[in-house]
Amino acid sequence: MSEIILEARDIKKHFPVTKGILFLKQIGAITAVDGISFTISRGETFGLVGESGCGKTTTARLLLLLETITSGAILFNGKDLTQLSAPELKNYRVSVQAVFQDPYSSLSPRMRTGDIIAEPIIANNALSRKAAKERIAKLIEVVGLRIDGAELYPHEFSGGQRQRIAIARALAPNPSLVILDEPVSALDISIRAQIMNLLHDIQQDLGVAYLLIAHDLSVVKHMSNRIGVMYLGKLVEVAESEEFYSHPLHPYTQALISATLPIHPDDQREKIILPGEVPSPFNPPQACRFHLRCSQAKPICSEQEPLLQEVTSGHQVACHLY
Amino acid sequence: MSSGNILLDVKDLKTYFSTRRGVVKAVDGVSLCLKEREILGLVGESGCGKSITCFSIVRLVPQPAGRIIAGEIIFDGEDLLKKNEREMRAIRGRRISMILQDPLTSLNPLFTIGNQTAEPIIIHRKLGKNTALEKAREMLKLVNIPSPEVRMKEYPHQMSGGMRQRIVGAMVLSCQPQLLIADEPTTSLDVTTQAQFLKLLKDIQQQSNFSMILVTHDFGVIARICDRVAVMYAGKIVESAETRELFNNATHPYTFALMKSLPNMGDRLDKLYTIEGQPPEMHALPPGCSFAPRCPEVKEICKQKYPPLSVLKDGHYVNCWLRT
């Protein structure tokens, strides 16, 4: 295993729920992320899958320091973020960049493409203006935009092209980790493959690590080295990509894989249709959060919470069946 | 399943929009044929005209920007384009129903679920309020809404996305339509909910024998429930065939490339097949075949003339110069 650049240790995020107008009273909390741990190594892609509301995006926002963690720790290159000095923290913000789902709302309509890409460089005073200009030209070439693209505004580009601008902006300060939050789900199918190939090429050339967040298992499977599955704020299974697909252990993972649509009408894989829907994170089920929808639930599942444990090498699962 | 009478026959439909940048030929000579009890998948990328084709069939194209300028829509022996607005109102919701992509915007936030589900029954089947409510409860039960009596008194915001889409399903099926048009019905749903909803749709379709046009951009949805598929590109149908035939022998370079560009869960390849370039601007389409600028096998004639329809096999049609 190569060098670990980022580690999340039992991170939690609770959003308070209040009642009343003048005299706010906290009546509970939504546990968006409830104690998850994982690591990301240099140059690898860690995929995070799960349905909406399971806490994938909150996890990304915690890592980007857009939200503060309720408890737990994030370690970057072995150092706890809360222990970092201000310049070190700034360095962290430079090293971890993000590409968001919707390229229409993530780019300022009032800035030229060149300025959008330059912003993270200039904000960090990393380069002189002249050097920045050269770097922008290089990045525009890397992501495959037209050469005069720097002078244009985002509305002059299509969705796929805008996503390329967002990728160029994320790469501008030479990050070691890029968080990709549903990078292709807003794009058309013919454009999706272009962007996925681009992200793959960039990783090969620059050795940047990705945290890929998506709900589409086939996208995650295609791009990731390791995959983690989230359900209601918990990580229920983590495995290497191949192992994950050939031997899914957690019943929820099995159902997710089976619910993925076939790519051929003859592809008759065993269908597990989960009953019901993801429960509300305001009042999640006790013990194992999945036991109400699980076909293999045992009495212990409603009494004791299963912990994430290593079953075989590199394959962790949180389930009483193992 | 493929034997049966023809329920809907769309012939050379053209729906154009006049915009400031020129005429947009959103639907440009689309012909479709749907048999009874058949599920036809209409697949294509955004802006290719698949939704406008559906809105044209029920004559709900936004006016006055858009106009159906030519074609015939023969539904159950009658041309819908010759009907007046009153006659259309009697058909919409009663004989042809629609499910749209976003269930939240197709439900009224101010009325209870029971009220909304009963409304089409009262209007179209001319039943009294109490009978209609009873019927609505049965429909909600059919689409697996837990404890429908309680849910009927609640409002759309109290339901989850999957539940809302099932409620819309209950509403549109309550009048036993002959044709159901579903425009991206599962796009806004999660994977497990999507699997649930598709199974439900297929089960109900087999029980009550209606035909369906399913609009999607996802070949997986097609593979799971459709009998036949039509692929659209820039306002035209470029290839149509039975589902299995299309997946095995995709012929048009566009269909072929789309299928190859999908990430496969089975084996991990480093690179995906890609289609170069962007979908064309609809107000400035190239002369000849619209796909020519992106086509890897383009020939000189493709840039000049639109290819005629060729029959490859019984039921497999393609518009491509490579196959003529």
Image (tube, coloured by chain):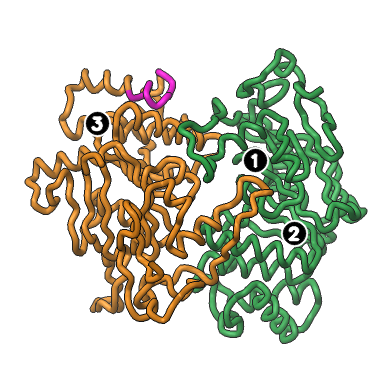
Could you tell me residue B95's position as x and y percent? 81, 63
Q: Which residue is mark 2?
A: B180
Q: Is residue A190 left or right of residue A118?
A: right
Q: Earlier in the sequence, mark 1 or mark 2?
A: 1
Q: Is residue A200 left or right of residue A270?
A: left
Q: Residue at x 29, y 31 (%)?
A: A207
Q: Amino acid at mark 3?
A: Asn
Provide the residue span drawn in magenta. A139-147
The chain assigned the colour orange in the figure is A
Q: Is residue A242 above or below residue A69?
A: above
Q: Which residue is mark 1?
A: B44
Q: Is residue A26 left or right of residue A232?
A: left
Structural crowding at the residue carrying mark 3, measured as other residues with C-alpha within 10 Å and reported as few (<14), some (14–19) or many (≥20): some
Q: Chain of mark 2?
A: B
User: Marks 2/3: CA distance?
Assistant: 52 Å
Structural crowding at the residue carrying mark 2, measured as other residues with C-alpha within 10 Å and reported as few (<14), some (14–19) or many (≥20): many
